[in-house]
Image: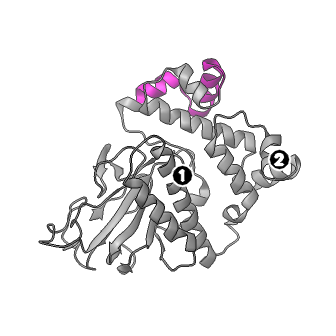
Amino acid sequence: MRYDAFTGSGFHVVLHGRGWLITADEPPRALGPGDVVLVPSGVRHGLSHAPRALDDLPPGDMSGQPPPDGPADFEFLCGVYRLDQGQVHEYLLSLPDVIVTTHDGGEPELASLVGLLVADLSQAGPGREATRSALLDLLLVHVLRGWLRTHPGPDWPLVRDSSVVAALRHIHGEPHRAWTVSQLSAAVGMSRTAFTRRFTGLLGKPPRAYLTGVRLSRGAQLLRETDAPLAAVARQIGYSTEFAFGTAFRREYGVSPGRFRDGARSGPVVTGPVVAGSVVAGSVVQDGRHADAGTVPGPRGAAGTVPRGGHGR
């Protein structure tokens, strides 16, 4: 499978067999079961059973036909994190084009996490979307930690700061909650002053401003993807009135929530939580359309696997 460049951050998890990661600027890289590939900036790349198998394959096409018998030789799970491109943090932009974390790469929890994710995909029922979103968030965290362990540098203090990371989990997990700086600092065991100073230094904005950005990004997603009344959207992201939501939204996006919704539905817009939350796995935005990214159809927020045999020839 060859993937053209897309908006968002893609990932692949090798479930079975061995294959190759193909990129424009690096030699083909061998992949094995349990390896995880993160594509932070959605660059053009490919996955194949052989290093040269994609040379003549158009973007988005499968190579070969299902094998005559037996399982596929190379099976992987894939998906895309859809991010608000207007609020993506500079740390994401400074990541390499591709990060590969091997199954024995020093993140022992990664194998268990992948197992939980695969098991969850085979089940249905209430709460599954939230569970999958949380698992995919953790997948991203562990991949980044593994990479940072071998690529230390002064530009990456955020991921290593457990207190600020814990605060981010609270904010992204419950953006609708009426968080105060005092509550957040208490939740992570810091004084209000020290927490504000550290948070602002690492994120480039104080906690309240960051929370507002997350809320409005979530609101933009709801406006684009649902028909919920504006008052309902406001309540879901922590605003007590439609007026308060509209005022904050106009300040951030330059248009009213209603006009944003109309504009988003008349053309392609890719938005979502700044770091994590809404995940549309198995699809990429390409030329204003959703293009299949090598997964079987599934519910929004869930990842699928490559059709049997799709990459096994």
Q: Amino acid at mark 1?
A: Ala
Q: Which residues are magenta?
A: 239-263
Q: Earlier in the sequence, mark 1 or mark 2?
A: 1
Instruction: Name the residue at the left extreme.
Output: 68
Q: Which quadrant is the C terminus positioned in? A: bottom left
Q: Mark 2 packing: few (<14 Cα in 10 Å), some, or many (20+)?
A: some
Image coordinates for residue 7, horizontal then vertical, percent:
41, 52
Name the one closer to the observer, 5 or 31. Answer: 31
Q: Mark 1 packing: few (<14 Cα in 10 Å), some, or many (20+)?
A: some
Task: State yes or no: residue 274 in magenta.
Answer: no
Image coordinates for residue 108, horizontal then vertical, percent:
56, 74
**Viewed as shown, does residue 258 lie left or right of 168?**
left
Name the one closer to the observer, 249 or 81. Answer: 81
**Viewed as shown, does residue 313 lie left or right of 8?**
left
Image coordinates for residue 297, horizontal then vertical, percent:
29, 48
Question: Which residue appears at 51% of the width and 67% of the height?
Answer: 112
Image vertical order of residue 63 relative to residue 128, above or below: below
Residue underneath mark 1: 134
